[in-house]
Amino acid sequence: MILTVTLNPAIDVTYRVASIVLGEAHRVSDVDTRAGGKGVNVANVLTQLGEPVTMTGLGGTGFPLMQDFFPIGGACRRTLVVTDGIDGTGFWEPGPQVTAAEWSGFLDHYTALLTWSEARVVVLSGSLPPGLPEVAYARLIDIAHAHGARSILDTSGAPLRLGLVAEPDLIKPNAREMGDVVGASRRTTIVASKGPDGLEATTADGVFVVRPPRPIAGNPTGAGDACVAALARGLRDGTAWPALLADAVALSAAAVAAPVAGTFDHDLYLQIRTEINP
Ligand SMILES: O=P(O)(O)OC[C@H]1O[C@](O)(CO)[C@@H](O)[C@H]1O
């Protein structure tokens, strides 16, 4: 089983417009509203792939997908993506203020989940809401490792730099985040996402690069989450790096082609997977 952790989930709103012009008013042709946040998107992609997954995190008021989320008193944030079908522009609210008692309650809840769920891989994704310590991810990685689970960390800035101290098994920085991973332990695999140029994995077995066979237009929001879903499945199964990266590149591209984050175009995924064929 794969456990995804979303400490700062969101109600993701996606607006479709004909084109985006700064300083102008826009007529919205389509509105999509759904529960999101990076770990939720990873879990949704894994579910569509038929993989067993459990979601947890901090569920503020108004967050509709409570399941194994730990309830907190603040309101769930919203995020907004405006897309013209060729690209997307995102606006991320900061999230609710989390109290020390809520964080401590979540740590107990998370430890209990790891004890009974037999999670083999824990995916920790996204920003931290206000009030959480910047070492939050390091703490959660330590607990995951103590329960025999492997860990994937997908975040940025101080939570990423401090999370590295706990030696996550895998991180997935983009070009902007590469400066944050300079001190990463040799035990941590770095899968650098290079946008349209694909993925480069620096691993204990060497460096592997896989590029998408052709450019895909659409809404790139959530493509990184689809990539993490493939990496989590591959880490759980011990898939060899060339095949694992091909899977992650194909799933990311198929997510760009889907209109909203947390979904992907299944036919395109299989097609690109065959085209890469490592
Ligand atoms: O947690 P953050 O880094 O603020 O990112 C949140 C956002 O990222 C996405 O997961 C896309 O990757 C959106 O669904 C949105 O909720």
Image: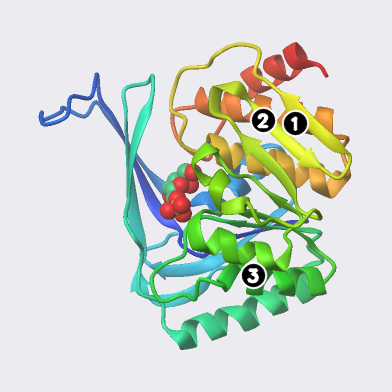
**The C terminus, quarter of image:** top right
Rendering quarter of residue 206: top right
**The N terminus, quarter of image:** bottom right
Residue 262 image position (x, y, % from top left) = 53, 40
SS type, badge 2: strand
Dot 2 corresponds to which residue? 199
* Residue at 56 percent of width and 72 percent of height: 136
User: How many numbered marks does the figure carry?
Assistant: 3
Q: Residues within 10 Å of mark 3 (few under 14, many from 20)?
A: many
In front: label 1 or label 2: 2
Please tell me which residue lies in front, 250 or 199.
199
Residue 267 image position (x, y, % from top left) = 64, 18
Please tell me which residue lies in front, 199 or 276.
199
Please tell me which residue lies in front, 151 or 15.
151
Pointer 1 or 2: first along the chain: 2
Rendering quarter of residue 270: top right
Tag 2: residue type? Leu
SS type, badge 3: helix
Q: Residues within 10 Å of mark 1 (few under 14, many from 20)?
A: many
Q: Where 30 sits versus 181, above or below?
A: above
Q: Are marks 1 and 2 in contact (CB under 8 Å)?
A: yes
Q: Which mark is residue 245?
A: 1
Q: Where 261 sits versus 79, above or below?
A: above
Dot 3 corresponds to which residue? 138
Q: Is residue 201 left or right of residue 19?
A: right
Q: Is residue 78 left or right of residue 275?
A: left
Pointer 2 or 3: first along the chain: 3
* Residue at 81 percent of width and 74 percent of height: 146
* Residue at 81 percent of width and 72 percent of height: 147
In the image, farthest residue toward the bottom: 101
Tag 1: residue type? Leu
The reply to whether residue 6 is visible in this rendering is: no
